[in-house]
Amino acid sequence: MLKLFYTAHTCSLATHIVLEEVGADYSTVRIDFGKTEQRSPDYLKVNPKGRVPALVTDRGILTETPAMLVFVAQSFPASKLAPMDDPFLFAEIQAFNSYLCSSLHINHAHRMRGPRWVDANDAAAIAAMQRKVPESVGACFELIERDMLKGPWVMGKRYTICDAYLFTLAQWLEADGVDPARIPRVLDHRRRMSERATVKKAIAQELV
Amino acid sequence: MLKLFYTAHTCSLATHIVLEEVGADYSTVRIDFGKTEQRSPDYLKVNPKGRVPALVTDRGILTETPAMLVFVAQSFPASKLAPMDDPFLFAEIQAFNSYLCSSLHINHAHRMRGPRWVDANDAAAIAAMQRKVPESVGACFELIERDMLKGPWVMGKRYTICDAYLFTLAQWLEADGVDPARIPRVLDHRRRMSERATVKKAIAQELV
């Protein structure tokens, strides 16, 4: 059985939603950032990176959202959430998810995780990074709005793992200072996603 | 025919090496950062993100190294550079590549690309980010050394797309201020990669 280590309000929600979408038999373990459980010796045995998410499988532990999303989709091929038999379409899915993890999520992280990139005592530099977040995260969402979100779903008519991932990161855009009025298609996607039973269930489980 | 847009000394080398490894029929187009060609109107039509690499295929244009590496490997299945039929092993490959793009490469980018994350005129904040690079990039390489590089190749006995990607990013570690003595297995991997004919050819083509 699959076991997801998650923290509410983080990118682990994307994998959680996809586990619901495919109808997987899975359990969850909450990691409390308030108690820095992500750095506890027990959790570092699960994920030496000290971050969520992590997915325990019968064959070992996986990390990194883009990898986990494909793994779940590929393990439940009837879900058709990732087209492994079409190299170009699959690459488009991968490119989208890679952009989310290495550009959008990274820009967002400069608001809360500044000490990854400057000395933790350098308040001025941390504040300088925070000031840039509305612009840098906003630019990512505007690129997604204009060039990447095909509609109605990210990849067009086909609902894929990209939709769960975009929805997850779109939770944070107001707190990041992005003007929602500039990205109406992203907002409409987020609203439609929030109405799915699978999404409601995953979120409710995390907020218990 | 495939066409790779590249810039020397960037992560586009990873895809270039894999194109050589699979024996693809491909051409290359150099994008000159010195002339900011990555932001030219013509190139923005290829890649609206204004970055390299980009790969023109018969079905459209792909970006993002993890996606491009899998696409090339999957398009040349005889190369066996990515095991699409083994979901767990494939996920391990994806997790490794995702870590490189969203952690190692990002930490490295804080040395040269500071204005992505702070105001371009904030010299103090840019310098603060640069000072952190030896530590943040070093921590990534130490995790790879200790937990991720199985040996002799990244995924063990099997040579995969991960090897071309790790080799590419390992080009920069001395300039990033990482002490090579702390990561002997990464250094040995880099040396063995540099002796491959495919790697030599890809590098030579970029430096013409």
Image (cartoon, coloured by chain):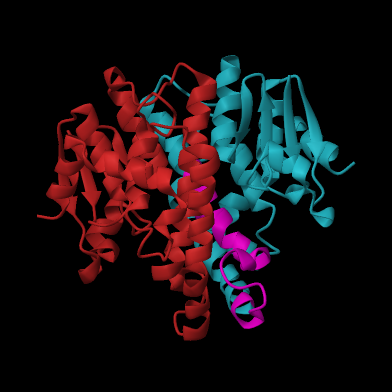
Chain colours: A red, B cyan
Residue at the outermost left position? A208
Judge left or right: residue A97 versus residue B201.
Answer: left
Percent of width and height locating residue A184: 41, 47
Dominant secondary structure of the residues highlighted in magenta in the image: helix
Please provide the residue range marked out in magenta. Answer: B97-126
Percent of width and height locating residue A93: 47, 32
Above or below, A194 relative to B62: below
Above or below, B75 relative to A92: above
Q: Residue at x 15, y 31 (%)?
A: A25
The number of numbered discs placed on residues in the rendered structure image is: 0
Judge left or right: residue A124 versus residue A71.
Answer: right
Judge left or right: residue B68 versus residue B204.
Answer: left
Q: Does residue B49 appear in the picture of this structure?
A: yes
Percent of width and height locating residue B42: 77, 40
Front position in the image: B157 or B82: B82
Percent of width and height locating residue A186: 40, 45
Above or below, B99 relative to A132: above
Where residue B175 sits, quadrant-wise, is bottom right
